[in-house]
Amino acid sequence: MSEMVCVEIMKLDPRAKIPQYMTSQAAGLDLCAVLDEPLVVAPGERVLVPTGLALALPSGYEGQVRPRSGLAWRDGITLVNAPGTIDADYRGEVKIILINHGQQDVTLCPEERIAQLIIAPVVQAQLQEVTTLDNTERDQRGFGHTGRGGNDESVTK
């Protein structure tokens, strides 16, 4: 079993569900919606869904909010900013920014599992400004250079 870290969690709404790992080796804790009534999300629409929870993550950790694969596959629902980041010093309500990439309206129900929360260690970097960088085999090639012959041509519209 991997290392366990203590994360304090507070219900801001009595209807909030304390996240749970659904299996013994699950990486993510399921986050549930706190809604007064079902919420219809139209194709292309973004919604901010409350969880009714606040966290106190220990220093050196972050919360990563990720989509649920079932919602993504079945309904086209994902996170706009996947993964979302909850910083260790944030104490406000955890809210989930969802988007419907499907072709049909999707109804989210109160208490429905809408996202996953991963608790992960964070390394902060000390940036050092330089005037040149070392050369590598890859160098400046990017955007598909190892795939189907993509190129790095910039496209602006």
Image (cartoon, grey):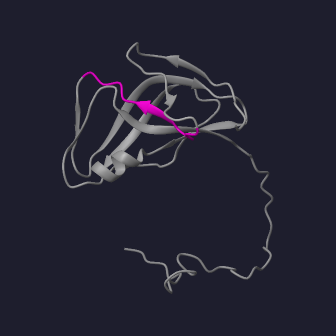
**Image quadrant in which the C terminus is located:** bottom left
- Numbered-mark total: 0
Farthest residue to the top: give it: 14
**Is 29 part of what is drawn in magenta?**
yes
Q: In the rendered structure, which segment of residues is drawn in magenta? A: 25-36
**In the image, is residue 59 above or below residue 104?**
above
Q: Left of 68 or right of it: where is 90?
A: right
Q: Position of residue 1 (x, y in %)?
A: 70, 37
Q: Position of residue 66 (x, y in %)?
A: 48, 44
Residue 79 in view (yes/no): no
**In the image, is residue 134 above or below residue 55?**
below
Where is residue 119, by image quadrant? Answer: top right
Residue 144 in view (yes/no): yes
**In the image, is residue 23 above or below residue 110?**
below
Q: Left of 66 or right of it: where is 108?
A: left
Q: Position of residue 120 (x, y in %)?
A: 65, 41
Residue sitting at x 40%, y 12%: 14
Where is residue 64, by image quadrant? Answer: top right
- Closer-to-camera residue (20/135): 20
Residue sitting at x 80%, y 76%: 134
Farthest residue to the left: give it: 104
Q: Left of 79 or right of it: where is 61?
A: right
Residue sitting at x 23%, y 24%: 37
Most common SS among magenta residues: loop
Q: Position of residue 129 (x, y in %)?
A: 79, 62
**In the image, is residue 137 above or below residue 69?**
below
Residue sitting at x 46%, y 34%: 30
- Closer-to-camera residue (18/150): 18
